[in-house]
């Protein structure tokens, strides 16, 4: 049926192709319940948003989220998770905080740092790196690669703050330490030349610039000893140390012992053992994709999430409501054997489980359709809020689409649900770029960057009218504003008050009683009335039969016919003429 702010349908069964077509007309599902906002009437217009997975460009924040998850899985995250959350076996325990303290607890976890002993180990490791660089500088002095008659400063390796770490294209490594000794050496050489030649201003050092000195030292350092997983590179005069996923725990726990450039075999064996010991602490991570079905572990996690994150009451998170909301689905599953173009899992409704060391930490409820993966809902363990699992799961779902295009070339898009520009908390979906918004009138896709200027001005916009934005013509934008306002006022004046119902039985109807002959004639004419679409070929389900409306219209009396045809016209308008002739509108 239709409410004042949304259109609603109940679906007993639905093909994936039909649901894909409904998505592309602004519909969504909640269980077997289909709904679509009435954009001109609702206070918060909701635009369907999607992005093409192959064109996705992650933001710096999204890369950070991915890196943070990688460090957590490898045990390299700076934060130390409370023993109340993770026990010695590596499994997750119960949180000690109540629901409304969830965000406070997460912030405390995020800000907690390694203990004093761990910090001392890190300091010792940085000191050992500094000494290695000093030894290499002395070797360069003796070999003549650096002037030997200059008093040079001592190297000092510093840890790079997480907020200042340079993001790398490859998420498998990250900048951990840096040393600026090359700048200090160059400055010392410059001062010596000024004294010797009495030259004012800048002194040309030839090849011994900070950049060249850093490259020289980094090359020697790599040749002699690249410490257990740390990658060494010179960058604009800095000597940078990058950690790799597999070895980074050595950096954070300070397990790398001091090794000189001429370390002996015994030290190397000891270092290898420490590497293997640290690597043994990695967490086992799995992503499991299963057909939508009830699972007790999932339901327990859902309850915990709803109670602690959304402050729901116990009666609102019952098993029956969970089933209706996230388990039940009208979509007919299509296996790869039924459709060779389908991905290995097939098409239909699925639950994507995120599992760490055998413990369920998050569940993504998704629909996999011929053209897209449609993200429906996500719930996660509140104890792991610091991992930003909502963002991480979106990145994984985008990655899944990209990987499965080889199996299903038509599967190209990631649908994020509704984008609500008038609600600041719902604008985060536009961070997944480049995205597109669906025009609520003509159902054309419009780039978000093109739509945003007018969405900043008005809540409801006919997006397909935004060609003026391409020319940046403010007068045209003003004209579009005026036209849209006039159209919206007319729509409000002409909007019907009654609603259509899609039920298994004809409802007892309330309407003005008018059974004269003229009404019957008017009812006959609505069959070919194309203002709301032709209803003569709407597919009607009566018990087991499937019939076109034109073939059964005479089975209704005049009053029923007038009401029913009004309903069918609304139905045809909101789902489209093509779908109305393919989907079965059940009346009994």
Image: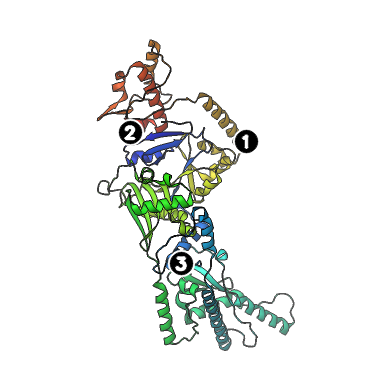
Quadrant in which the N terminus appears: top left
Rendered view: 247 above or below 135: above
Question: Where residue 287 sits in the image (x, y, percent)?
Answer: 36, 58
Q: Which mark is residue 83?
A: 3
* Mark 3 to mark 1 CA distance (whole Å): 62 Å
Rendered view: 208 above or below 462: below
Task: Kindly identify which residue carries mark 1.
Answer: 475
Give 564 or 191, whichever is nearer the viewer. Answer: 564
Give 585 or 321, whichever is nearer the viewer. Answer: 321
Q: Is residue 447 visible?
A: yes
Question: Where residue 410 sits in the image (x, y, percent)?
Answer: 36, 47
Give the side of residue 144 with respect to residue 304, left or right.
right
Task: Kindly identify which residue carries mark 2.
Answer: 583
Q: For the point 46% across and 56% down, which residue is it?
A: 382
Q: For the point 60% across and 77% down, which residue is it?
A: 182
User: Secondary structure beneath disc 2?
Assistant: loop
Mark 2 or mark 1: name the one nearer the start of the chain. Answer: 1
Q: Residues within 10 Å of mark 1 (few under 14, many from 20)?
A: few
**Closer to us: mark 3 or mark 1?**
3
Q: Is residue 60 visible?
A: no
Quadrant in which the C terminus appears: top left
């Amino acid at each position: 049926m239709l409410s004042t702010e949304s259109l609603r349908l109940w679906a007993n069964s639905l093909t994936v192709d039909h649901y894909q077509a409904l998505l592309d007309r602004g519909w969504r599902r909640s269980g077997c319940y289909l709904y679509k906002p009435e954009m001109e009437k609702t206070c918060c217009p909701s635009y369907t948003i999607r992005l093409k997975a192959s064109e996705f460009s992650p933001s710096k924040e999204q890369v950070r989220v991915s890196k943070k998850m990688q460090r957590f899985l490898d045990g390299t995250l700076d934060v130390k998770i409370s023993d109340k959350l993770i026990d010695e076996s590596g499994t997750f325990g119960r949180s000690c905080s109540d629901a409304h303290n969830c965000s406070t607890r997460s912030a405390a976890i995020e800000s907690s740092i390694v203990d004093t002993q761990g910090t001392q180990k890190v300091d010792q490791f940085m000191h050992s790196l500094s000494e290695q660089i000093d030894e290499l500088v002395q070797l360069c002095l003796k070999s003549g690669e650096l002037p030997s008659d200059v008093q040079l400063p001592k190297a000092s390796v510093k840890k790079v703050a997480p907020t200042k770490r340079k993001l790398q294209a490859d998420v498998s490594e990250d900048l951990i330490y840096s040393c600026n000794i090359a700048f200090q050496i160059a400055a010392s050489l410059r001062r010596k030349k000024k004294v010797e030649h009495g030259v004012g201003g800048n002194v040309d050092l030839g090849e011994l610039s900070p950049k060249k000195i850093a490259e020289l030292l980094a090359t020697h350092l790599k040749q002699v000893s690249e410490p257990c997983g740390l990658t060494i590179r010179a960058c604009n005069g800095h000597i940078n140390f990058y950690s790799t996923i597999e070895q980074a725990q050595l950096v954070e726990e300070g397990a790398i012992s001091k090794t000189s450039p001429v370390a002996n075999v015994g030290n190397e064996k000891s270092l290898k053992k420490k590497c293997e010991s640290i690597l043994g602490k990695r967490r086992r991570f799995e992503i499991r994709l299963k057909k939508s079905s009830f699972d007790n572990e999932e339901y327990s996690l859902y309850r915990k999430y709803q109670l602690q994150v959304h402050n729901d009451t116990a009666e609102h998170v019952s098993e029956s409501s969970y089933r209706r909301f996230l388990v039940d689905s009208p979509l007919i599953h299509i296996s790869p054997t039924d459709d060779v173009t389908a991905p290995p899992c097939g098409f239909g409704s699925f639950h994507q489980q995120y599992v760490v060391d055998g413990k369920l930490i998050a569940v993504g409820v998704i629909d996999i359709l011929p053209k897209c993966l449609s993200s429906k809902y996500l719930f996660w363990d509140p104890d792991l809020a610091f991992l930003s699992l909502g963002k991480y799961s979106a990145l994984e779902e985008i990655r899944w689409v990209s990987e499965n295009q080889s199996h299903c070339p038509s599967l190209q898009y990631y649908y994020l649900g509704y984008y609500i520009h008038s609600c600041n908390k719902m604008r985060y979906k536009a961070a997944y770029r480049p995205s597109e918004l669906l025009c609520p009138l003509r159902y054309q896709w419009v780039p978000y960057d093109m739509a945003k200027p007018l969405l900043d001005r008005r809540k409801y916009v006919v997006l397909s009218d935004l060609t003026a934005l391409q020319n940046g013509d403010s007068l045209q934008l003003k004209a579009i504003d005026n036209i849209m306002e006039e159209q919206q006022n007319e729509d409000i004046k002409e909007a019907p008050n009654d609603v259509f119902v899609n039920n298994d039985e004809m409802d007892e109807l309330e309407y003005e009683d008018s059974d004269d002959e003229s009404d019957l004639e008017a009812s006959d004419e609505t069959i070919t009335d194309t203002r709301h679409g032709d209803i003569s070929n709407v597919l009607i389900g009566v018990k087991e039969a499937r019939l076109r409306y034109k073939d059964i219209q005479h089975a209704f009396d005049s009053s029923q016919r007038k009401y029913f045809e009004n309903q069918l016209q609304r139905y045809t308008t909101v789902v489209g003429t093509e779908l109305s002739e393919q989907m079965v509108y059940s009346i009994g």
